[in-house]
Amino acid sequence: MVTPPATRVVIAEDSVLLREGLARLLADGGIETAGTAGDGPGLVAAVAEHDPDMAIVDVRMPPTHTDEGLRAALEVRARRPGLPILVLSQYVEERYAAELLGGGASAVGYLLKERVADVAEFLDAVRRVASGGTAVDAEVVAQLLGRHRPGDPLAALTVREREVLSLMAEGRSNTAIAARLAVTEGAVEKHISGIFCKLGLDPAPDDHRRVLAVLAYLGR
């Protein structure tokens, strides 16, 4: 049996300690760190040099520690369309999350740095994004869902539909949602149908496409 090649990532993080810690965690999970960078231009150069399968990027990096990491990630995506990007942030920053996740983007993730402490969840998020899915922090989802506007169709969702939508936006499958909420998959499918009907979004057979449609709506 042929062993599939390990996923190769580039890490962009200005903290040497966190950068090395991430590389160690990834290595323990069978994921290779092909290169590292400490600022935005370094990320762009590292991706060009190493041609990785994925980039893990801190939002705030030198020199201003505002949005250099995100802007570099968007530049990388422009040069390498479809390159999976997982963004790490110290705090929930809605504008950055909406910019990254809006417009039907795929193979993207946005996690708070504190989630890295849950190694299994972090590695699951990395693998999900690397395979073309999404991984969005529950806190980010909660804040995006909370941005109601007059006439916002989100207001029409039931409490259970909101719970399902939140888990969908995190990138969870129907099976995982059913297990989390202790309901049947049939019930989850019924709630999803109701969500898309109320949001005016046509259901699609691919789970990730449905999630991305929701994220695109939330990011508008």
Image: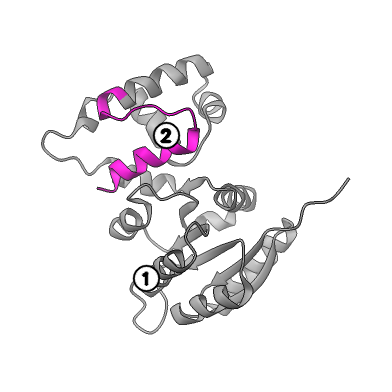
Q: Earlier in the sequence, mark 2 or mark 1?
A: 1
**Residue 159 seen by the camera:** no
Amino acid beneath label 2: Arg
**Residue 96 seen by the camera:** yes
Taking the spot 37% from the left edge, 49% from the top edge, the residue there is: 140
What percent of the width, then of the height, locates residue 125?
56, 49
| The one of 130 and 61 positioned closer to us in this rendering | 130
Q: Quadrant of the N terminus?
A: top right
The residue beneath circle 1 is 71
Q: What's the magenta region?
A: 197-220
What percent of the width, then of the height, locates residue 137?
44, 48
Report if residue 69 lies within the magenta region: no
Taking the spot 47% from the left edge, 53% from the top edge, the residue there is: 108
Taking the spot 51% from the left edge, 28% from the top edge, the residue there is: 177
Asked which quadrant contains residue 8, the reply is: bottom right
Amino acid beneath label 1: Arg
Report if residue 205 lies within the magenta region: yes
Few, some or many C-alpha atoms within 10 Å of disc 1 (few <14, some 14-19, many ≥20)? some
As drawn, the label of residue 210 is 2
90 displayed left or right of 176: left
Q: Is residue 44 above or below residue 73?
A: below
Taking the spot 56% from the left edge, 57% from the top edge, the residue there is: 116
What percent of the width, then of the height, locates residue 173?
53, 32
Overall secondary structure of the magenta stretch? helix
